[in-house]
């Protein structure tokens, strides 16, 4: 009988004799075991980031590919046929129709073709002059009218620039020498010379996904303890609030780091996005960002009473502000002053500066210390609020 009591005492851990880090590890170990026994959490951790990368990576694509172009050529000409052939051979444009009729542009865009027969959505209309061949030989050159569908302002602007550049280059090739009144632009694009949308959106997706997943996972940690009735077991232990919160945080830090590696791997394999700068600096900045995102979830977890309430609060607090106000899609400089001020509070705003600077430009700590410092301050403040709120609940 005494042997049984002795073995029971040997298995008992006196938390009061352990240092703070080991007491936090006791909570973290319990959380690890729960995650490993919960296949739904593992599915969220591994499957959702990969799914969101493919979904957003391919959906958020502003590249022009096979845009339909209608060409109005009143008089057949050698230069006109060459222009049509070169445009159609380009991966950016597809000549849907060549017509001799001078239809109204509104009718062309409304019906999709120059003869009112439909046939798809025309994005641009080229109107060639009747004397194109003769005009190209004149010292003053000739005019080619480019009309672009601007119903979508962003793609309309890209179409305008792309069509004008293509027509100008093709006409220059026809002449052999440039007309005096035309100026050939010489443009160089750094960091993203191919102007691929993926190189801009994939680093931004890293900010969106890490924030959403991290906040979502930790938002249900304390709430789950309340619903399952296991909070009482924590209350009777000598664990301090900071140790409980830190123990809750640690497993999800490791899981979020795994998500970050998955996002970088998918970005490299599926979208060809390479990290131009320091991988160590990117890892350190991402760790700070993950800590901040997890602290947001923990704060929500201390406020909510039900798990589904916590999940809704986490999605509402992270998804919409990050996508709309952080600069992920819309530039902050074009927003009203009140929204620009609000954008500075969102952690993803500062992490986007860091991740895009490191991945696209190879920027170092000398240029990124300010957003990194702000991100660190926000993480510490949110963690402190979580501990304080949890202490009040206790």
Image (cartoon, helix red, strand yellow):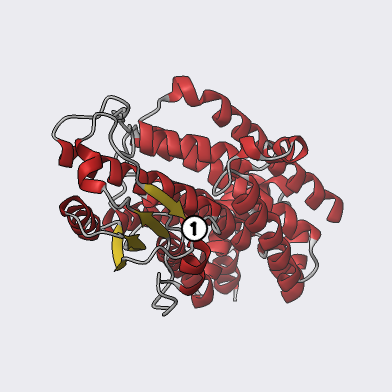
- Establish if 133 lies above or below 191: below
- Inspect this view and state whether residue 229 appears: no
Quarter of the image with the N terminus in it: bottom right
Residue 10 location (% of width, % of height): 55, 61
- Establish if 355 lies above or below 99: above
In the figure, is residue 369 to the left or right of 278?
right
- Inspect this view and state whether residue 63 appears: yes
Total numbered labels placed on residues in the image: 1
Quarter of the image with the C terminus in it: bottom right
Residue 141 falls in image quadrant? top left
Taking depth in this image into account, of 199 and 394 the one nearest to the observer is: 199
In the figure, is residue 184 to the left or right of 107?
left
Residue 356 location (% of width, % of height): 44, 38
Residue 326 location (% of width, % of height): 61, 44
Which residue does the numbered mark 1 point to in the structure image? Answer: 149
In the figure, is residue 383 to the left or right of 279?
right
Residue 248 falls in image quadrant? bottom right
Taking depth in this image into account, of 16 and 317 the one nearest to the observer is: 317
Q: Which residue ends up furthest to the top in the rendered image?
A: 366
Residue at left offset 73%, top offset 59% = 301
Pointer 1 local density, CA inside 10 Å: few below 14, some 14–19, many at least 20: many
Residue 225 falls in image quadrant? bottom right
Residue at left offset 57%, top offset 63% = 30
Residue at left offset 42%, top offset 66% = 122
Taking depth in this image into account, of 160 and 387 the one nearest to the observer is: 160
In the figure, is residue 15 to the left or right of 280?
right
Residue at left offset 57%, top offset 24% = 370
Q: Which residue ends up furthest to the bottom in the rendered image?
A: 117
């Amino acid at each position: 009988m005494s042997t049984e009591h002795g073995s029971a005492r040997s298995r008992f851990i006196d938390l009061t004799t352990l240092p703070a880090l080991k007491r936090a590890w006791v909570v973290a170990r319990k959380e690890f075991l729960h995650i490993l026994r919960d296949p739904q959490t593992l599915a969220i951790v591994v499957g959702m980031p990969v799914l969101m990368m493919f979904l957003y990576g391919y959906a958020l694509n502003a590249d022009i590919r096979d845009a339909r172009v209608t060409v109005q050529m009143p008089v057949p000409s050698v230069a006109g046929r060459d222009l049509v052939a070169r445009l159609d051979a380009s991966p950016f444009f597809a000549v849907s129709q060549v017509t001799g009729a001078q239809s109204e542009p509104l009718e062309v865009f409304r019906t999709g073709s120059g003869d009112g027969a439909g046939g798809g959505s025309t994005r641009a209309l080229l109107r060639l002059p009747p004397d194109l061949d003769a005009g190209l030989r004149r010292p003053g050159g000739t005019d080619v009218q480019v009309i672009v569908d601007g119903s979508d302002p962003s793609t309309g602007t890209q179409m305008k620039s792309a069509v004008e550049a293509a027509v100008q280059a093709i006409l220059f090739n026809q002449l052999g020498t440039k007309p005096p009144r035309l100026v050939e632009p010489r443009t160089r694009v750094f960091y993203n010379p191919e102007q691929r949308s993926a190189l801009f959106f994939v680093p931004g997706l890293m900010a969106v996904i890490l924030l959403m997943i991290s906040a979502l996972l930790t938002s249900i940690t304390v709430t789950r303890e309340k619903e399952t009735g296991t909070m009482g077991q924590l209350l009777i232990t000598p664990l301090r609030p900071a140790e409980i919160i830190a123990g809750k945080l640690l497993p999800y830090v490791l899981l979020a780091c795994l998500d970050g590696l998955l996002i970088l791997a998918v970005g490299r394999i599926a979208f060809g996005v390479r990290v131009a700068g320091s991988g160590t600096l990117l890892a350190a900045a991402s760790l700070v960002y993950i800590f901040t995102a997890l602290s947001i979830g923990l704060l929500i977890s201390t406020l909510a009473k039900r798990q589904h309430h916590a999940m809704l609060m986490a999605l509402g607090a992270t998804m919409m502000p990050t996508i709309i106000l952080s600069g992920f899609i819309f530039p902050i400089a074009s927003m009203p002053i009140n929204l620009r001020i609000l954008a500075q509070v969102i952690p993803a705003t500062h992490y986007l500066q860091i991740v895009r600077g490191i991945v696209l430009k190879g920027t170092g700590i000398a240029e990124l210390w300010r957003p990194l410092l702000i991100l660190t301050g926000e993480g510490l403040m949110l963690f402190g609020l979580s501990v304080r709120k949890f202490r009040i609940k206790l």
